[in-house]
Structure formats: structure tokens, C-alpha cells
Amino acid sequence: MSNDVTVPDSPVDPGESRAPEESAPTQSTKARRIPAFVVATVLILAGSAIQLPMFLSLVKQRSTLAIMIAITYVLYTALVLWIFRRIVKWERPTKPATALAFIWGLLVVGAFQLVANGGIAQLLLAAGGVKFYNDWAPAFSASFTEEALKAAGVLVALAVSARRPKTALFVFFIGATVGLGFQVLENVNTTFGYALGTDSTNIKALGFIFGFRAVMLGLFSHIMYTGVFALGLGYFLTRKDRGFGKRFGVLLSGIVFAMGAHFFNNSPFLKATFPDSPVGNLIKAIVPFMIFVIALVVARRHAKAVLDPKTESSPPAR
């Protein structure tokens, strides 16, 4: 009987063969992650110092509504993150990186966009007066300050993550989670604003804003903007089989999409036609949403070709 051992050509579990080197972090990995973690911690604490006093003042006025909002959006966030995980099932960030991405959108973007928007307000008032400011401030502030801050969150979460992305889906998960965090913050603030401004009941305020902003327009907002930017960034970082020019072009396209779609959505276009209706927002979101879906489908096809053992022999999608 022979004692020779035959070594298979490929590992038993193809998925393991592609797993990132995360079991034993190297010095270079630690050198990258520690400064990013420090930066993230400082900015999150600063964001908390800005946001929490404002939130606590709202809670004092409507404590029951605050409890209802907390329960609703904890469940909503868990459901959306579960959907994200299903979309990127072949490659997912770690839970700490996911938590950082969400908290960044919730606290850092929410706090510092207030500071940055004050400067934009002064410029717009000086350039065009009060009417120009009222019409265009949401478009300029959203497309520049919010998208820049969310993009920074994607980069910080990637730097902190113990895993390295192998496909654009990994980066998409982080970007969409940053967008989700900021979207939840906006929805919470809008709910309190509607309840206090219209003296509505708690159930009416929560139901109306949640139905309008989370259910009807949820996928047409920050998840979409930052998700497409992240897909472009992910393509740039992971598609080393493509030339630098093409990779940079895809990255630039993601940046232009995030800023342009957000600018267009917040612009006064169609507001006169549909002054008190979400129809205008839905019309403006149709084309960007189609681009978002197409980009995500292409990214999933490539990830499946690269990471799914069942399609191991298939050529990667372009």
C-alpha cells in the first residue's frame, strides 16, 4: 500500500482560497488601520457633540415619538442591511466596518454638513439673494458637502476594515451603509420637524414621513447616490486587470453621478408643477435609479464570476 498523499490542484473550498489575508494582520495593515481608526473616532465624537444636544432637545418635546422612531428605524436599518447582505452575498465587510460606515453617515455627515452648509449659504446669498438661496441651496449643499462627507466615510471605513475588497460589491456595501446612516438621520429629523411644525400626532408624523421618505423614496436617495460612487471606487480599486484610464474613468463617473443626481433631485425642477407631491421626486429619480440598477447588476455579475465557486470557470464580466 502506498503512503503517498495526492495534493489536489485546487483547495477543497474555493471560497477559502480567495479569502483575504486577515488571520494574521501585518505591520503594514496595522499601520493603515490604526490612524484611520483614530481619525474616525475623533470625528465621530465631534459629530456626537454637535448632534446629541439637538436630538435631546427634540426628545424632551416628544419623548414618546422618540421611542417610536427608535424602534421603527432600528427595525428598518436591520432589514435594509439584511437586503444589502443578500445583494453582496459573495463578499461582505466585517461587522465593525459596517457599524463604522453607518455611524459615520449618522453622526459625522449629519454634523459637519451643518457646518459646511453655513458657508455655502453665505456664498449663495451673496451671489443671488434670498430667492436664489431658497431655490438652489438644497441642490448645492447636498451635492457638494453631503456627497463629499459620505465619500470620506467610505474611504475611512475601507481603511479601518480588516478585509480588503476583491470586487466592487464590497465597496458598494460600505457606501450604501454610509448613505443609509445619513438617510436615517434625515428621516428622524424630518419626522420631528413635521410633528412639531404641524402639531401632528406621533403616529401620523412617523407614519407619513416613514412612508414617504423611507418606503417610497428610500432607494432613490442617499443609498443610491453613495452606492454608485462606491461601485465606481470599487471598480477602480479592484479591477487591476483593466487599464488605469478606464478604472479612473469609472471612478470619475461614480463621482459625477453621485453629485449630479443629488443636485438634480434637490433642484427646483418640477417643484412648481408638483408643489406638494412626491411625483416630481419620483420622476427626477427614474433615470438615476435605472443607472444605479444597471451598475449594480454588472457589479454582481462580475463578483459572481470571480467569487462564486459554481461559476469559477466563467470569464469575469466587464
Image (cartoon, rainbow, N blue to C red):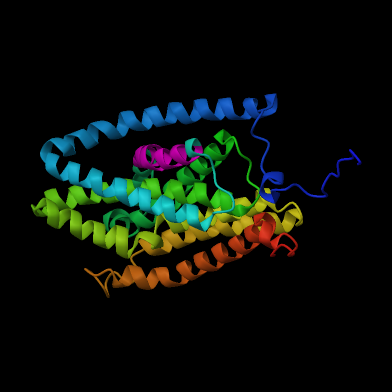
Above or below, 42 against 316 in this view is above
Is 221 displayed left or right of 20 in the figure? Answer: left
Which residue reaches farthest bottom?
Answer: 273
Task: State yes or no: residue 152 in magenta.
Answer: no
Is 119 displayed left or right of 290 in the figure? Answer: left
* Residue 109 locus on image (x, y percent): 40, 41
Residue closer to the observer: 84 or 112:
84
Give the position of the N terminus as an image quadrant: top right
- Is residue 33 something one can see in this rendering? yes
Q: Residue at x 17, y 35 (%)?
A: 57
Task: State yes or no: residue 102 in magenta.
Answer: yes
Majority secondary structure of magenta residues:
helix
Above or below, 49 against 99 in this view is above
Which residue reaches farthest front?
Answer: 1
- Is residue 125 something one can see in this rendering? no
Residue closer to the observer: 94 or 127:
94
Instruction: Count the labels in the image.
Output: 0
| Range drawn in magenta | 97-114
* Residue 62 locus on image (x, y percent): 12, 42
Above or below, 163 against 192 in this view is above
* Residue 5 locus on image (x, y percent): 86, 41
Q: Quadrant of residue 316?
A: bottom right
Q: Residue at x 63, y 60 (%)?
A: 304
Is 62 displayed left or right of 94 in the figure? Answer: left
* Residue 78 locus on image (x, y percent): 36, 48
Give the position of the C terminus as an image quadrant: bottom right
